[in-house]
Every structure is written in structure tokens, then in C-alpha cells.
Image (cartoon, rainbow, N blue to C red):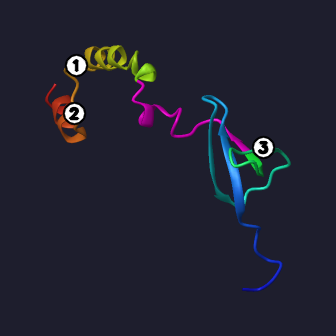
Amino acid sequence: MRKDIHPEYREVVFLDISSDFKFLTRSTLNTSETIEWEDGKTYPLIKVEVSSASHPFYTGSKTNLGGLAGRVERFKRRYAGRSTNKAEATSEAEEK
């Protein structure tokens, strides 16, 4: 490897600010903040808004899907009977 061209790859702590979940891993991201980890060592701290502890896909939360059923039904009512195929729509228009 050439010297002085690669970023420093080191251990860092990621903190999910929405759930207060922390995990230790390795990264090249730079930060000026630090945190003391469970092993007593101080590591750089990277704050993130979403992690596996707060993302709905991983937590099984369905809070964001609450109004989806109503929107789908409204869409179906609004466009009921309309053809989605352009060829069919063109031939129907020509017949009239």
C-alpha cells in the first residue's frame, strides 16, 4: 500500500439518536466527538438518525402504513373502470 493516501480505518461508536442505541464497529468516517465505551476506552462518536434499532423494517413497526389502506381504496374508487392498457383505451375511444 502507498503511504498517506488511505483514510484511517479505526474503531468508532455509532449512536442512533432516535433510540439511544450504540454499537462499536470500524469505519473511516471522521468526527471530533468522542465517547467512553463499556470497555473503558474512548472512541470517536458518529451520530446517525436511523439504525436497525429504529428503522421500521427491522422493528416491525407499522406506524407509517396507517393511512395507506385508505389511499389505496380511494385510488381504486377514483380509477375504477378505466383501462390501464393504452391499446385498449385507444380502441375504445375509436369505437365511440
How much space separates mark 3 and mark 1, taking CA atoms? 57 Å
Q: Position of residue 8 (x, y in %)?
A: 76, 67
Circle 3 residue: 35
Quadrant of residue 50 within the rendered picture: top right
**Crowd around label 3: few <14 · some 14–19 · many ≥20 (10 Å):** some
Residue 55 lies, in percent from the top left, at 50, 34
Q: Earlier in the sequence, mark 1 or mark 2?
A: 1
Which labelled disc corresponds to residue 5?
Answer: none
Labels 3 and 1: the sequence-earlier one: 3
Q: Is residue 36 above or below residue 66?
A: below
| Relative depth, front residue between 37 and 73 | 37
Q: Locate residue 94 relative to residue 79 in the image: left or right.
A: left
The disc, 3 or 2, on the residue closer to the chain's N-terminal end is 3
Q: Residue at x 73, y 56 (%)?
A: 29
Region rendered in magenta: 46-61
Q: Is residue 3 magenta?
A: no
The residues bearing labels 3 and 2 have C-alpha atoms spaced at a distance of 63 Å
Residue 39: x and y, percent?
69, 49
For disc 1, the marked residue is 80
Q: Quadrant of residue 2?
A: bottom right
Q: Secondary structure at mark 3?
A: strand
- Image quadrant where one finds the N terminus: bottom right
In the image, taking residue 92 as reference, residue 22 lies left or right, namely right
Disc ID at residue 89? 2
**Residue at point 39%, 29% (across, down):** 60
Q: As rendered, which of 39 and 72 lies closer to the eye? A: 39
Indicate yes or no whether the magenta region holds residue 56.
yes
Asked whether, in this view, residue 18 is left or right of residue 33, the answer is left
The amino acid marked with disc number 1 is: Ala
